[in-house]
Image (tube, rainbow, N blue to C red):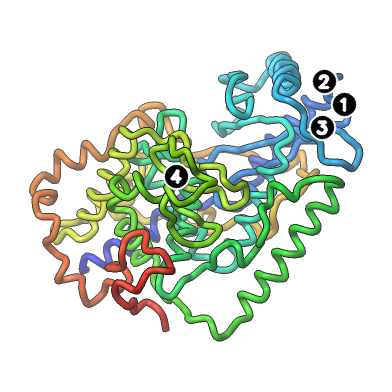
């Protein structure tokens, strides 16, 4: 088995293992239902509803993914925007009610955050973030869901990149690294800038700044956004003149690493703009000035907000190191399934490197292709269990450092194996990093028709 086949096999095994089953979806619906019962008992939140957002709604969550939930206040038919102090007061009532009800562990009230939240862990070891009136988060999640329907490889690569990032502890904004939403946008940008592109600039899907259009009557605002996106996505999918990019998942993962391998040097002068599908010089973009961030990845649905605003310079260097080491391992002639498993997935998936066969009866079941809506029913008789939860020990391990110690000889030969892969690797992997559409092509890709 050659190196390319090993990478393909291990990535597919990881994807099957981390993809949520119908049961995983049911578990989250059960938690939402339990939270709704608690909210219904709070006098200050009479009439409020509990609605999910984030990766659960966008269908970009993994088997062990967190759950984001918003308490939507009763305000007639109109979109409301309560102040931060009011949100803090309401969430203080919520955490008291959760403690009184019992069954919710590790309760934490983060009142001074940009968006005040209550964090807790429900049954089945699923971590939850609870906020107030996060309609923008719900709509962003739906947007990503609609985008993922254009090409299923987007969802697959997001899941793999998130697992890889968690493996190396670069997917935690609390400690100065990348949040999952930002990672999803980086994958989106990668798909926009391939040759040929897999996904279009988001201006072609929704030409406005979505956050500015969430005003007035909620049902009308949501309907207008959804109809505009539906028309444009239908047009994009039916356009037979669009060149087709047939890159495989391993090729896409490798070219993702290649594109961002010099992220440190480029971040100081250029920002990533998924709305237009290209990079921009920071000093020429008046919306981004003054430049006070280590890395700039603009939120295409809430311009000019920076989704990478929490990334520190120290963590950016670590991100770059992880990218480079992973890329070197993927082209190494000495790679094996054990080393690939260690660098691409967390310890609870270490069985992948031992060639153990997986049970695909549940892991191959993906979530329904319908985005979550309000008041989704759940049966009380639905059997609920939880397997494979990550432990504290697993979260604390540092696989990159472990791998570097055991693979010193491999790391000393980062270029070995490049020539042996040249027949299989797409030439799109050689494209200029972060190359804007307006720049001349560095080298024509061959991953299309």
Q: Is residue 98 above or below residue 386?
A: above
Disc ID at residue 46: 1
Task: List the residue tagged with mark 3.
Answer: 73
The reply to whether discs 1 and 2 touch (Cβ–Cβ < 8 Å) is yes
Label 3, secondary structure: give it: loop
| Inter-mark Cα distance, 1 to 2 | 7 Å
| Inter-mark Cα distance, 2 to 3 | 12 Å
Label 4, secondary structure: give it: loop
Ranked by sequence position, the earlier of labels 3 and 4 is 3
411 displayed left or right of 207: left
The x and y percentages for residue 104 are 64, 22
Residue at 77% x, 43% y: name it. Answer: 379
From the image, state whether disc 3 or disc 4 is nearer to you.
Answer: 4
| Inter-mark Cα distance, 2 to 4 | 40 Å
Disc ID at residue 160: none
Disc ID at residue 42: 2
Disc ID at residue 296: 4
- Other residues around mark 4 within 10 Å, as few (<14) / some (14–19) / many (≥20): many
Ranked by sequence position, the earlier of labels 4 and 1 is 1
From the image, state whether disc 3 or disc 1 is nearer to you.
Answer: 3
Q: Is residue 41 above or below residue 58?
A: above
Ranked by sequence position, the earlier of labels 2 and 3 is 2
Taking depth in this image into account, of 6 and 110 the one nearest to the observer is: 110
């Amino acid at each position: 088995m050659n190196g390319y086949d090993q990478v393909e096999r291990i990535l597919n095994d990881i994807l099957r293992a981390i993809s949520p089953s119908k049961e995983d979806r049911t578990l989250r619906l059960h938690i939402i239902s339990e939270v709704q019962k608690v909210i219904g008992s709070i006098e200050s939140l009479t009439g409020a509803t509990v609605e999910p957002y984030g990766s659960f709604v966008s269908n970009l969550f993994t088997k062990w993914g967190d759950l984001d939930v918003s308490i939507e206040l009763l305000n007639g038919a109109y979109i409301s925007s309560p102040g931060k102090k009011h949100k803090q007061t309401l969430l203080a009532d919520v955490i008291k009610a959760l403690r009184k009800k019992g069954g919710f562990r590790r309760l934490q009230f983060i009142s001074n955050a940009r968006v005040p939240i209550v964090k807790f862990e429900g049954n089945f070891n699923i971590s939850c973030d609870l906020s107030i009136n996060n309609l923008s988060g719900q709509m962003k999640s739906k947007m990503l869901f609609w985008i993922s329907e254009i090409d299923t490889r987007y969802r697959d690569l997001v899941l793999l990149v998130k697992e890889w990032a968690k493996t190396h502890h670069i997917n935690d904004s609390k400690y100065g690294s990348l949040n999952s939403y930002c990672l999803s946008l980086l994958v989106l940008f990668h798909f926009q800038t391939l040759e040929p592109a897999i996904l279009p600039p988001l201006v072609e899907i929704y030409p406005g700044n979505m956050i500015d259009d969430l005003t007035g009557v909620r049902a009308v605002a949501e309907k207008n956004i959804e109809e505009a996106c539906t028309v444009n996505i239908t047009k994009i999918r039916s356009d037979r003149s669009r060149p087709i990019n047939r890159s495989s998942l391993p090729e896409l993962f490798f070219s993702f690493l290649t594109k961002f391998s010099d992220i440190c040097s480029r971040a100081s002068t250029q920002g990533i703009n998924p709305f237009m599908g290209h990079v921009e010089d920071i000093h020429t973009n008046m919306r981004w000035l003054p430049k006070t961030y280590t890395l700039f990845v603009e939120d295409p649905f809430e311009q000019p907000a920076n989704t990478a605003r929490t990334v520190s310079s120290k963590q950016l260097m670590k991100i770059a190191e992880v990218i480079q080491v992973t890329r070197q391992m993927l082209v190494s002639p000495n790679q094996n399934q054990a080393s690939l498993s260690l660098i691409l997935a967390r310890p609870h998936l270490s069985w992948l490197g031992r060639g153990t066969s997986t049970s695909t009866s549940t892991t191959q079941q993906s979530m329904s292709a319908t985005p979550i809506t309000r008041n989704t029913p759940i049966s009380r008789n639905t059997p609920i269990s939880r397997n494979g939860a990550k432990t504290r020990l697993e979260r604390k391990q540092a696989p990159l450092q472990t791998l570097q110690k055991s693979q010193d000889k491999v790391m000393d030969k980062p270029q070995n194996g490049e020539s042996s892969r040249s027949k299989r690797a797409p030439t799109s992997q050689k494209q200029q990093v972060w190359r804007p559409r307006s720049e001349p092509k560095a080298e024509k890709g061959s991953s299309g028709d």
